[in-house]
């Protein structure tokens, strides 16, 4: 396989799959740059905590993925943009060499943002040539690998927004990522009454069925047994969560899991991340304010509550006389008529540990490290958030984070045991 197509290949009309991949590749790669466009070079270099990464690093790392996983391995004659960057922008792939420490990504003032943009352009040209020039056997392998790279980039597109929001929240000026009214987190109508839906029960299959893209952790499809349960038709709102706070939710240890109560005490949590209490000098007002991508806004009682940890979600569910659904319950119920806000609002904590499905086998090669090695100590979230690219969401998607994580756009949906 060569990066330089033969004259015959250049003259031939690309097949539909390659045309579609070229267009999708260009679209996804351009969207990353569009997300970064409102940010200054200084904004794109800062790292506000070890769990987050600078925007500039995200832009480089997603290019590194195509370079290290696709081009270096499958394009003979490919010349790296800068071989030293294989170390700088590796995330956690032990099989692909050494890496710069994650907590120190914000110290990478160089390479410059302009150089990172040059890196992206270099990788883009090489990938586009590879799509055109790969022979048939190579394309059979490369098509799925390129699709993985695009979904990987879409994961980082959401992280660009959530990571920079955390960074901006550390600035006492509370600057907005972008001007304009908040989008995507408002319910239709004003705080409609919660309806309980009867979830499918008995022997059911969950997991990806093989149609279209899926990460390896969504497979294999398998049978689960679900006892009768009910599930909320919508997400819990900010107004409902404010009632939990007003009722002493953060002062009542009986509502909390032991580890969660320890975190509440140690971190002095009193509200979801980015909520600003009435009278706070950062945004003086007689009511709750919320800091988000559009700056400080009055709390919208009808919007889905976000930036909750698993511990907060579980405590709220306990206070509400309910519980969190398991991931199998969520997936089985997500296709029900009346099941609202499955996608595009907030990731939804479940009561399921992030474990392998029965019969799970990771991918082979370097991408074997993509998911499987993280299957311990984390909790599954389902759905998608307002920052998730729409083409990246699906009903079998298994997001996962440690239970104390709050800087993601994570909320909750309630469930109860028993039939309606």
Image: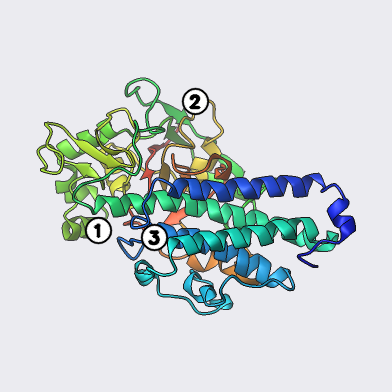
Residue 122 in picture, x, y percent from top left:
61, 62
Whichever of labels 1 and 3 marks the residue nearer the N terminus, that label is 3
Residue shown at 31%/52% (left/top)? 166
Q: Nearer the viewer, mark 1 or mark 3?
A: 3
Instruction: Return the residue at label 1.
Output: 258
Q: Residue furthest bottom?
A: 98
Q: Is residue 309 visible?
A: no
The one nearer the camera, 271 or 203, is: 271
Q: Secondary structure at mark 2?
A: loop
Q: Quadrant of the C terminus?
A: top left
Q: Decide: few, some or many residues near mark 2? Use Cα within 10 Å; few <14, some 14-19, many ≥20.
A: some
Q: Nearer the viewer, mark 1 or mark 2?
A: 2
Q: Residue furthest top?
A: 189
Q: How many marks?
A: 3
Whichever of labels 3 and 2 marks the residue nearer the N terminus, that label is 3
Q: Is residue 323 left or right of residue 388?
A: left
Residue 59 in picture, x, y percent from top left:
49, 58
Spatial CA distance of label 1 from label 3 is 33 Å
Instruction: Return the residue at label 2.
Output: 338
Residue shown at 76%/65% (left/top)? 3
The one nearer the camera, 5 or 73, is: 5
Q: Is residue 251 left or right of residue 85?
A: left
């Amino acid at each position: 396989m060569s990066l330089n197509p033969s004259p015959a290949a250049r003259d031939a009309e690309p097949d539909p799959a390659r045309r579609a991949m070229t267009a999708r590749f260009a679209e996804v790669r351009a969207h990353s740059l569009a997300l970064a466009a409102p940010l200054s070079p200084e904004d794109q270099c800062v790292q506000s905590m070890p769990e987050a990464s600078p925007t500039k690093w995200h832009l480089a790392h997603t290019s590194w993925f195509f370079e290290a996983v696709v081009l270096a391995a499958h394009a003979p004659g490919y010349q790296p943009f800068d071989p030293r960057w294989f170390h700088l922008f590796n995330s956690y792939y032990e099989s692909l060499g050494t890496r710069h420490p994650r907590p120190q990504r914000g110290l990478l003032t160089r390479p410059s943002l302009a150089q990172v943009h040059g890196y992206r352009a270099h990788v883009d040209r090489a990938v586009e040539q590879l799509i055109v020039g790969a022979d048939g056997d190579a394309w059979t392998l490369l098509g799925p690998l390129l699709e993985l790279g695009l979904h990987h980039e879409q994961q980082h597109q959401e992280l660009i927004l959530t990571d920079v929001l955390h960074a901006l929240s550390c600035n006492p000026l509370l600057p907005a990522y972008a001007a304009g009214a908040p989008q995507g987190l408002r319910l239709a109508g004003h705080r409609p009454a919660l309806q309980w839906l009867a979830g499918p029960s008995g022997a059911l299959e969950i997991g990806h069925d093989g149609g279209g893209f899926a990460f390896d952790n969504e497979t294999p499809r398998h049978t689960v047994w679900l006892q009768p349960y009910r599930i909320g038709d919508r997400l819990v709102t900010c107004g409902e969560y404010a009632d939990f706070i007003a009722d002493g939710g953060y002062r009542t240890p009986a509502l909390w899991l032991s580890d969660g109560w320890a975190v509440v005490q140690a971190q002095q949590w009193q509200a979801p991340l980015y909520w600003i209490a009435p009278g706070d000098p950062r945004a003086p007002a007689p009511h709750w304010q919320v800091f988000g991508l559009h700056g400080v806004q009055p709390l919208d009682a009808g919007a889905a509550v976000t930036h909750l940890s698993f511990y907060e979600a579980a405590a709220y569910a306990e206070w509400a006389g309910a519980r969190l659904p398991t991931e199998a319950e969520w997936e089985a119920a997500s296709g029900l008529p009346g099941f609202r806000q499955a996608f595009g609002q907030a990731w939804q904590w479940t009561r399921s540990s992030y474990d392998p499905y029965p019969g799970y086998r990771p991918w082979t090669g370097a991408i074997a490290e993509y998911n499987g090695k993280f299957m311990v100590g984390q909790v599954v979230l389902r759905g998608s958030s307002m920052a998730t690219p729409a083409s990246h969401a699906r009903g079998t998607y298994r997001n996962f984070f440690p239970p104390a994580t709050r800087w993601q756009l994570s909320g909750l949906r309630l469930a109860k045991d028993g039939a309606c």
